[in-house]
Amino acid sequence: MAYENKTIDSVYNLLVNQCQEKFNNSLRLLPKSFIVVLCKVLAGIFILPYKLVGWWYLQLFPDTAYYGTVKILGFTINPLIKLGEQFGVKEPTSGQAWSGTVRLNVVNEGRPIMTGTQFKSDATGLVYVSGETVTAEGETVDIPIYCTQSGTAGNLSEGDAIKLVSPLGFVEQEGSIQSVTQIGVDDETEEHYRARVNTRYALQPQGGAASDYRIWAYDVPGVLQTYPYNDEESPGGVIIYVAGTTDVYPTRIPGRELCVAVGEACTYDPQTGIASRKPLTAIIDPDADGTYRNIKPVSVVTVDVFITNIVGVDKADFGASYKSALKNFLLECEPYIRGLSDDNNKKNLITTNNLIAIANSIATSYKAKFGTVQMQVNSVTMTDYTLKKNELADLGTIYIDGEEYEE
């Protein structure tokens, strides 16, 4: 029997029709009002276990498991996290606070800047604290600081201005960020954690297969996707291209620190520190110095789109819809890796036919028409483009009848 999504009303109507037929037409022993009340009670009793069984069935699979805490017989669990633990996926990663160094000009030498000295950034509005005591010597002094709040909201870049909350007198109040040692990362989202569990559920570790490197890399906060390949220039070498999440790396091109973290995660188990991951003969750190130069950032190709002769709709309205659809399409494009990619849905080829199909769907929704569609990849006109091993795609500029579209 198929499991149908019944409602209380549907169960009630079924019961009341049957009961009224049996009791009123045949026996006529019970009043009609009593039968109605009885059927309502029975419908409620029936639907509770029916819904409960259905809900628990959904908890068996990563796609449908509930992400939130539930308390059952005194035990509090999160069904999706519990499911992830069964497949070896640790709990969602916590956010990390930004850290770096600030450089201040020294007015009078020889005095210490104590641990816990507070700074504030006008750009983020957040407070930063010095991590150690530093003596003001020379013309400038570099002070290690960290944000008091974890997440991307506290991220600063080299050269950004920052001020002492309370002037010290022997150094200038305003300085600038000299270096970044840790980028702030938000708490892992439900969407990203569910993707990790789904990946582990579908791709069980095989001791160094291509899918394993993708699974291991997901343990690092800020990783969107990885693309592992054999190093053609080195027997046993493995090259991994890393894409970062857009909340931390808007272009998806990560910094060196994320690549190193991926190399560590592909070698050592983050929970135990034991080198239980990549095979002993696999080489991802050719220099054996922790730089992991075989772990590299992806690059992004820019696709500019030219469309002409839009009629039947305001160009601005068409442009807004077309831009959103193009952006989503290009963000989903990625290199093809046999054994990791879906052979029935390859996403490494970008063609003008793709762009025309998207324009057709937008035009149909507006009951409008358009003329021609062309594309340029990295400023070169072409009809199709296949993404290379290390490439992702992003939308550049849309031109409507030769004029740049701006929202």
Image (cartoon, rainbow, N blue to C red):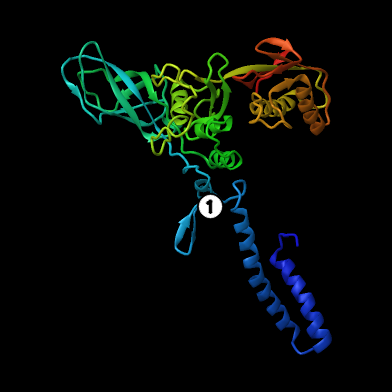
Residue drawn at (56%, 51%) of the image: 66
- Residue 406 can be seen in this image: yes
Q: Is residue 334 left or right of residue 150?
A: right
**Residue 399 appears in view:** no
Q: Is residue 42 above or below residue 62?
A: below
Residue 337 location in percent, x, y?
Answer: 64, 26
Q: Quadrant of the C terminus?
A: top right
At which x and y percent is residue 228?
57, 25
From the image, which quarter does the N terminus lie in?
bottom right
Question: Dot 1 lies on which element?
Answer: helix
Q: Position of residue 51 (x, y in %)?
A: 64, 62
Q: Amino acid at mark 1?
A: Pro
Q: Who's the residue at 73% across and 10% down the image?
A: 381
Q: Taking 395 as reference, is 354 left or right?
A: right
Decide: is 89 above or below 339: below
Q: Quadrant of residue 286?
A: top left
Quarter of the rendering containing residue 55 = bottom right
Residue at 42% x, 30% y is 184
Q: Which residue is mark 1?
A: 79
Judge whether 339 appears above or below 158 on screen.
below
Locate residue 1 relative to residue 92 in the image: left or right. right
Q: In this orientation, which residue lies closer to the viewer: 53 or 216? A: 216
